[in-house]
Amino acid sequence: MNNSTQSVTFNRKEKGRAAEEAAANYVEQQGWTILERNWSCRSGELDLIAENGETIVIVEVRSRSGLGYGSPAESVDRRKIQKVRQTAEIYLQRVGKIDRRIRFDVIAVMLGRQLNVVSLEHIEDAF
């Protein structure tokens, strides 16, 4: 098979990285300051931690490359919300910002075959 007709498949990590990059670019275009990307501890990982004025925004980035398993936003279930909230609490304690206003947003990214962004949906105060 020659290379021009061969389709390229991307793994989960590459898709996740592309979606997170798109989300980071989006929040920076909104004028937010990114404090952390992929911050992790024992309880989990936070995709993006940003500051929007006085508010710390924890952004959960979800992506899909097809709708066979539902939309990206639909993949944020109760267990995931609980894990993100726990991890955010640990982050805020560690950086001494436990008293700051906090918000949890979801950025849902649909990716095309070449990891191009087909759509990006920002859901403020998602949970």
Image (tube, rainbow, N blue to C red):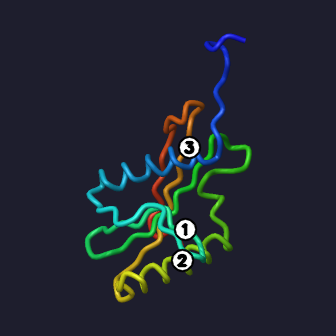
Residue at (44, 65) in percent of width and height: 124
Q: Mark 3 belongs to which amino acid?
A: Met
Quadrant in the picture for residue 98: bottom left
Q: Is residue 86 left or right of residue 35?
A: right
Q: Please name whichever residue, 26 or 20, is drawn nearer the observer in this view of the structure.
A: 20
In primary-sequence order, the first of circles 3 and 1 is 1
Q: Is residue 56 left or right of residue 124?
A: left
In the rendering, at what x and y percent does residue 14 appear?
57, 43
* Residue where numbered disc 2 is placed: 87
* Residue where numbered disc 3 is placed: 110
Quadrant in the picture for residue 115: top right
In the rendering, at what x and y percent does residue 43 appear?
60, 77
Q: Secondary structure at mark 1?
A: strand
Q: Secondary structure at mark 3?
A: strand
Residue at (32, 69) in percent of width and height: 51
Residue at (29, 62) in percent of width and height: 33
Q: Mark 2 belongs to which amino acid?
A: Thr
Question: Which numbered disc, 3 or 1, marks the residue closer to the eye?
Answer: 1
- Quarter of the figure with the N terminus: top right
Q: Mark 1 belongs to which amino acid?
A: Glu
